[in-house]
Amino acid sequence: MVSRRSLSALILLAVGVCALGGPPVLAQVSRWSVVPAQSSITMRVASPLGHRSGRFERWEADVRFDPEAPEAAWVAVTVQAASLRMDNASLTQPAIGPALLDTARFPDIRFRLTSLRRLEGERFTAEADVTMKGVTRPVRFPVTLRSAGQTVQMTGGFSLDRAAYGIGTQGSWNRLIGRQVRVDVSLATRPA
């Protein structure tokens, strides 16, 4: 569960404030708070027993947003990698252990939005940097922004090549799980 108090730092994954720098100063951009009960960061990967899924339970987001100019948004998320809970509880420890996420050495997964470009209506293309296990790679993915009263919901997802981040590249895990990991993010936000 994301605590309201912890929202000032960014997504440990990754969906705290990124070490790469702070948000740009923009006249109408203001801080928004995440609504934890309406937000989630999940993952899904193929295995010999079918797709396995998991949910990150602890993460923080720093969101700066102007509803009149969504393209000026600044979002940084820090996910506590050890908070991953797999759909099969017996898979949680291997997933966060040394062969895969290695959360003892790499406790955070970071996501930093670098660009948001409107396609039409509520549809956008997002570009972001994702950092896991000390490796940063860019991702590009479709997102939808929907407004309902004071709440703005951002929904999107992308696929990552786990081997590009050094995840599960040694031993039997490399053969047992798919290389592509699907990450889905849903952030509900309100003005802080």
Image (cartoon, rainbow, N blue to C red):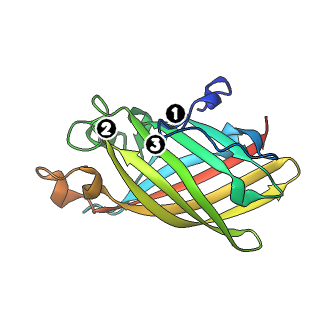
Under mark 2, the amino acid is: Ile
Q: Label 3's element?
A: strand
**Percent position (x, y) of residue 52?**
37, 55
Q: Which residue position is annotated with label 1?
A: 58
**Nearer the viewer's eye, disc 3 or disc 2?**
3
Residue at 66 percent of width and 38 percent of height: 36
Q: Which residue is drawn at 59% across and 38% down?
A: 22
Q: Look at label 1 and name its amino acid.
A: Arg
- Residue 144: x percent and y percent? 68, 64
State how far apart marks 3 and 2 are (Cα): 16 Å
Relative image position of residue 91 (x, y in whole percent): 31, 43
Residue sitting at the far top: 5
Q: In this view, does 115 lie to the left or right of 32?
A: left
Asked which secondary structure carries label 2, the reply is helix
Q: Position of residue 110 (x, y in %)?
A: 46, 42
Amino acid type assigned to the residue bearing label 3 in the image: Arg
Residue 171's mark? none
Q: Is residue 58 above or below residue 147?
A: above
Q: What is the crowding at mark 3: few (fewer than 14 residues within 10 Å), some, or many (at least 20)?
A: many
Question: N-terminal of the two: label 2 or label 1?
Answer: 1
Q: Is residue 15 visible?
A: no
Could you say which disc has been placed on residue 96 in the image? Answer: 2
Q: Nearer the viewer, residue 136 or 47?
A: 136
Q: Name the residue under label 3.
A: 110
